[in-house]
Image (spheres, rainbow, N blue to C red):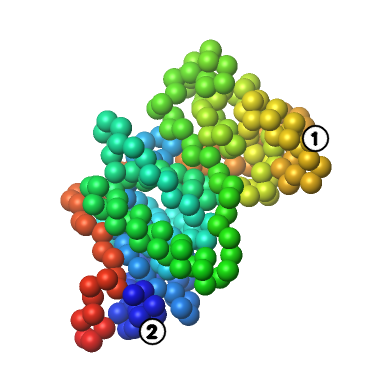
Amino acid sequence: MVDRLVNSEANARRIAMVESCFGSSGQPLAVPGRVLVGEGVLTKMCRKKPKARQFFLFNDIFVYGNIVINKKKYNKQHIIPLEEVKLEGIEDDGQFKNGWFIRTASKSFAVYAATSTEKQEWMAHINKCIEDLLRKSGKKAVEEHAAVWVPDGEASVCMHCKKSQFTLINRRHHCRKCGAVVCGPCSNKRYLLPNQSSKPLRVCLHCYDLLSTAKNSNSNDKDKPVGGNADTSGEEDSDDDEEEKGKGQPDTHDTPKFYGDNERSDDNH
């Protein structure tokens, strides 16, 4: 049981090690009641291509970061509250196998494990943590989640007008509502999506029309249209900041570690 590890020295030691690996680039992770449930490398589908990322599953948050030095140093820490997370399995497709979506209100993305067994282990442990957390807090699961971005490589032409071809000059953009890859003219509107940002975000013309229509029929709708074509969002293609030059990628695969299942002896050392 995860609860058994709450006050254990082994758990405190593991969390301190994670904090040390992120260094000054990360936030403090040691808080009362927090348990490190598991850790391992997953392949995250980033905007331009898949990237290996180090993931840490706690009983209340999911943390991941870029691998600078495998098992020693990570940066660009991301913290996701588990109470916002919903998982959804992905069917195997060609080279991409053993994947699932991690959906939250502010950001959603796909990850892939090395084997089907590891996929099952990750999803089971994450779902158990979510279930326990929601039960203890009395909160309800989040119903609305951000769209998963379509990777750049899957669209050579705009997914809205079906005409505009992407080049070095004609850049790809992503609709923050549906995740489609669209050209500039087909995404020149901004809409306030409070779950994702306090600033208006780029949306495609189709989603803008749908959101505006919904807004007009429901005056209490939190999503709000923003007039004009100026780029007021300040978030243009924000996934680019997750891209690195391939440094620190693990050469060999290590199976993920999950604590508390069969680890009774560790607390006794």
In the rendered structure, which disc, 1 or 2, sits on the residue that comes first in sequence? Answer: 2
Name the residue rendered at 49%, 36% in the picture.
149
Q: Is residue 143 left or right of residue 91?
A: right
Q: Amino acid at mark 2?
A: Asn
Residue 166, horizontal then vertical, whole percent: 48, 19
Q: Is residue 65 above or below residue 149?
A: below
Q: Which residue is mark 1?
A: 216
Q: Assign a secondary structure to mark 2.
A: loop
Residue drawn at (29%, 50%) of the image: 119
Which structural element holds mark 1? helix
Relative depth, front residue between 190 and 159: 159
Q: Nearer the viewer, residue 200 or 94?
A: 94
Residue 185 in the figure: left or right of residue 35: right
Query: Quadrant of the rendered structure where residue 45 is?
Result: top left
Q: Is residue 90 above or below residue 207?
A: below
- Mark 2 — residue? 7
The N terminus - image quarter: bottom left
* Residue 248 makes an appearance in the image: no
Please state, as top left, top right, bottom left or bottom right, where the C terminus lies in the image: bottom left
